[in-house]
Amino acid sequence: MPKKIPLIPGQKYRLGDVLWWTWQKDVFAEIAAMMGLPSADSNTPGWFTLCRTAEKNLLDGMTEEEKNILRGEAERMAREGLPKDIQRK
């Protein structure tokens, strides 16, 4: 059984991690584009090695306002821990 991600108030979260947890469909869409596929998911061979690059591409394409929203979410997670809906079951 997979481990649960603990709620750790005070933990710092990278913007890429917050992006992954909150915009996962967009990250997979970017991975699919990078691979030249119509779609990708966690069953697509090779997806994991492209995950961080896809996150960076999405972050690079964001406006400062969008990044500030992610920063706010990262700060909230640092104060309150991860929301239950993104904890592994």
Image (cartoon, helix red, strand yellow):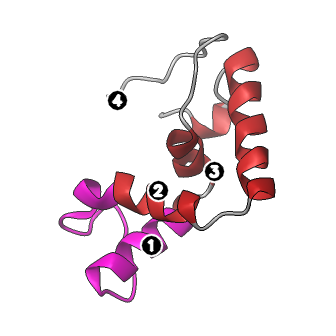
Amino acid beneath label 1 = Glu
Residue 42, position as x, y percentages in the image: 33, 60
Closer to the observer: label 2 or label 4? 2
Q: Is residue 67 magenta?
A: no
The residue that disc 3 covers is 22
Q: Earlier in the sequence, mark 4 or mark 3?
A: 4
Q: Earlier in the sequence, mark 1 or mark 3?
A: 3
Image quarter of residue 11: top right
Between 17 and 89, the residue placed more toward the observer is 17
> In this picture, is 19 found above or below 47?
above
Amino acid beneath label 3 = Thr
The residue that disc 1 covers is 30
Magenta part of the protein: which range? 26-51
Amino acid beneath label 4 = Pro
The residue that disc 2 covers is 55
Amino acid beneath label 2 = Glu
Q: CA distance from mark 4 to mark 3?
A: 20 Å
The reply to whether the C-beta atoms of the residues labelled 2 and 4 are less than 8 Å apart is no
Q: Earlier in the sequence, mark 2 or mark 4?
A: 4
Q: Which residue is depicted at the point 68% across and 20% down? A: 78
Residue 25 in sight from this viewpoint: no
Q: Which mark is residue 3?
A: none
Residue 44, position as x, y percentages in the image: 25, 69
Dot 3: within a 10 Å radius of its alpha carbon, few (fewer than 14), some, or many (20 or more) residues?
some
The reply to whether the C-beta atoms of the residues labelled 1 and 2 are less than 8 Å apart is yes
Q: Is label 4 in a helix, a strand or a loop?
A: loop
Q: Is label 2 in a helix, a strand or a loop?
A: helix
Closer to the observer: label 1 or label 4? 1
Q: Which residue is depicted at the point 41% across and 62% down? A: 54
Residue 75, position as x, y percentages in the image: 73, 27
